[in-house]
Amino acid sequence: MQLIKDKKYGGERPLFESHDLRLENVVITDGESGIKECTNIEADHCEFYGKYPWWHVDGSIITNCYFAPGSRSAIWYSNNMKMKDCVIDGPKFFREMNNLELENVTINDADETFWKVKGIRAKNITLHEGTYPFMFSEDIYIDGLTSDSKYVFQYCKNVELHNAKIVTKDSFWECENITIYDSELDGEYLAWHSKNVRLVNCHLAGEQLLCYADNLTLENCTFDEACDRIFEYSIVNADIRGKITNIKNPTSGHIIADEIGSVTIDENIRQPANCIIETRK
């Protein structure tokens, strides 16, 4: 493997069609497409400032690197990538990719990041600001996620999430096969129009959560006191610890809680309208 160390590059495509290359303390200063149409590239303690620096690369290991705000749309169409201990300040990262592994990565502008990525395995990820991270992505496993980005996980499939703290709105919409363990989810309109969502040991906050959901399961979950109009038009089986303030018009299933503030069943309920709602004795 060729080693390039302590160099600076700028302009258009300075490392185009490079193969079997290791970069150490390299800076891509400006220009576009610094690393493009490449295979088997390693980068350690490098900095990227120009646009589109990492496109169409197969086989990447990126460690201890920094991507500046100007490195927008930096990593697209690149498969089989591992990234560890990196900071990203640019938007629109990780598009149209397969097999992405991340560990200890902070993304400070998560706008439109992780779109159409298939096969994400991640540990200890932080997302700040921006909208629609993970849109149309699938086959995702994350252990340790902190996010205040808006509208996370829309139109996703096959997601397993552990130890997350998410503050958002309209999260997990139109998703399928979602399992979330030991997490805090804070925001309105959680998991509307989704199928096969399972929440285990989670704490939920926000209004009108978990509506229009098909095959929704909650195990040992708790709700913030301000939550109301929960489960409307959902097919649900829920084991709720503590109090739930208000349940509205669930379609069918079984809901049990330690305490239920109120239940709203009105003329708009959908058939079969046979959900069993009870307090734990």
Image: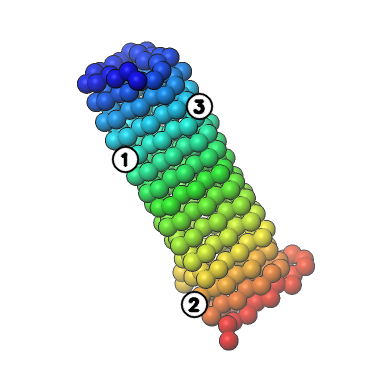
Label 2 sits on a secondary structure element that is strand
Label 3 sits on residue: 77
User: Residue at 46% across / 69% down in the picture?
Assistant: 224
Q: Amino acid at mark 2?
A: Gly
Question: In front: 92, or 197?
Answer: 197
| Quadrant including the C terminus | bottom right
Which dot marks residue 242? 2
| The furthest residue to the bottom | 281
Ranked by sequence position, the earlier of labels 2 and 1 is 1
Q: Residue at x 50, y 27 (%)?
A: 77
From the viewer's perspective, is 159 left or right of 15?
right
Q: Quadrant of residue 218?
A: bottom right
Q: Are marks 2 and 1 in contact (CB under 8 Å)?
A: no
Name the front one of labels 2 and 3. 3
- Image quadrant where residue 102 sits: top left
Measured in 3D between alpha carbons, the distance from the residue under mark 2 to the one under mark 1, in whole angstroms, is 39 Å
Question: Which residue appears at 56% of the width and 44% of the height?
Answer: 139
Residue 180, given in percent of the width and then of the height, sits at: 51, 57
Q: CA distance from mark 1 to mark 3?
A: 22 Å
Residue type, mark 1 in image: Asp
Residue 23 horizontal side relative to residue 186, left or right: left
For residue 85, the mark is 1
